[in-house]
Amino acid sequence: MNSIASFFGRAFYSFDERYLLTATIRRDGSSKFAKGNKWGWFPAVALAWRASQESFLRNNAIINNLKLRAGWGATGNQNVSDYAYMALLSYKTTPWGTGVLTGNTANPDLTWETTHSYNVGIDLGLFQNRIEVIADVYYKKTKNLLLQLPLPAYLGSSGQGAASNPWGNVGSLENKGIELTVNTTNITNKDFQWTSNLVFSLNRNKVLELDTDNSSIEKSYQPSSASYIVTKTTVGQPIGQFWGYKVIGRFDEPTDFYYKDADGNVKQVAIPEGNTIAKNSTWIGDYIYEDRNGDGVINNEDCTYIGNPEPKFTYGIGNTFSYKGFDLTIFFSGSYGNKALNLTRYRIEDPRSNGNILKSSLNYAQIGLIDPNGPDDDYRNLHVVNGSATTLPALQESDANNNFTRISDMLVEDASYIRLQNISIGYTFPKKWINKIFLNNARIYANIQNVYTWSKYKGLDPEVGAIYGDALMTGVDYGRYPSPRIYTFGLNISF
């Protein structure tokens, strides 16, 4: 249970419809913070110059509207658990009855997360406003980021009696980008109209600071008893990037196990720590992982960023046609450059699984003898016979090389897509018909949502979103239910 109190004030000023000023100030108080941190000030100011009202542009045949805008403002976020600043008690069943213990880790210094936003923009109307352009460039900096901080594993989990993780103000983050809208009237006459609209947005984010320069925020995925880091957030990088190993090849031939260095010395390719070149260890048909630190073994030190779930840009394109009483709207949406971590493949692309598996699991690497009369337990006489047909490793009794259980860039896919988002068709009955039955308006329509999606993504839906609504787990697909196709039919009438 929580409460918030707000005070709000706003002032407007306009001179000759050319120079515009809006100033806003608000004061918010939240019960989620301790005394001394409950209240925050959040001002904002916006300036605009309507240049089309100036004498040199007034009644211009081409430029009908030109408005230049600039703004700055601050907003606050208090989205934390109730009373997170203080220690609360919880109940726990014990052999001697109900016991009481600390339910959360208190943080009395918890305070408002604040975002300062700056933007400049332009509104432009051309050719009797048949072309309308709205463009904005923005920069946002968020300070005192609110985040629930992980505790060391030796303290236990909250389900086992340990206090829940504390909330804290951990650092700052920047977002900058462009937003563009273009509306056009392509054809308009007595019977037929055609209008279009385009929306385009581009955003880049970067972590500016955490508790220390070497701090990181790691998010894990726990498929069974094991737990694997899948995203990592560090200073100087975008938030929630995928984290894991890079696969640089596969041991298809015996010679793949060795290479010559710059001095001509023959050296063994790095294999997972504790492994040898042997059956049920690292063998022909296994993945080759990048040895990033050059120490000759593959371990956690070789993990790196393997993908960014943030798109390079998103867009939408819509067209509306109307002919007499008929109307048709078609809308496409899309995203480009974003990656997805397809964890459904992690579980069901392993051909050793005794449950449901993907069809692609049939394309695993198959091992054959180089010399049919030679031994089958010597890697020097083995090679992959379908090397160009698959990217999956070979089957072994045990996955000692962690081909199927290691989070790697083999699970990262391009999740760009174009989606026919919506088709709507309708008919509005003529007034002279419906007025006879005492109706003022009558329209019949049909609508289809999520009509079709074009994407190279192998999962069910490239629009993955975030697991549990956690922004640091965006793009992690663990069997997300796909967007359903929805059919709607209806009738609108008014008297």
Image: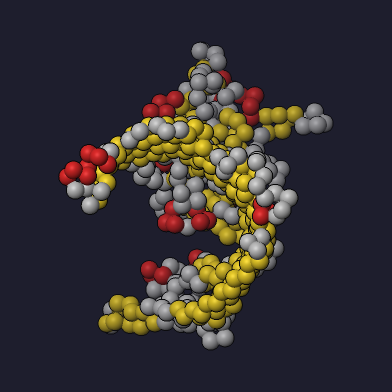
Q: What residue is drawn where x is 43% and y is 67%?
A: 157
340 and 382: which one is in front? 340
Is 304 on the left-hand or right-hand side of 188?
Answer: right
| Position of 364 relative to 224 (above/below) | above
Is 182 on the left-hand or right-hand side of 292?
Answer: left
49 and 486: which one is in front? 49
Visible residue check, residue 308 = no
291 and 246: which one is in front? 246
The colour style of the image is secondary structure
Q: What residue is drawn where x is 38% and y is 78%?
A: 1
| Residue 100 position in % (x across, y down) | 36, 83
Is 44 on the left-hand or right-hand side of 1?
Answer: right
205 and 421: which one is in front? 421
| Residue 336 position in % (x across, y down) | 55, 39
Visible residue check, residue 57 = yes
Give the quadrant of residue 11. Answer: bottom right
Q: Residue furthest bottom?
A: 35
| Position of 17 relative to 76 (above/below) | above
Q: Residue furthest left?
A: 437
Q: What residue is drawn where x is 61% and y is 42%?
A: 126
Q: What residue is drawn where x is 43% and y is 76%?
A: 82
| Residue 108 position in % (x across, y down) | 54, 82
| Total numbered labels | 0
| Residue 2 position in % (x across, y down) | 41, 78
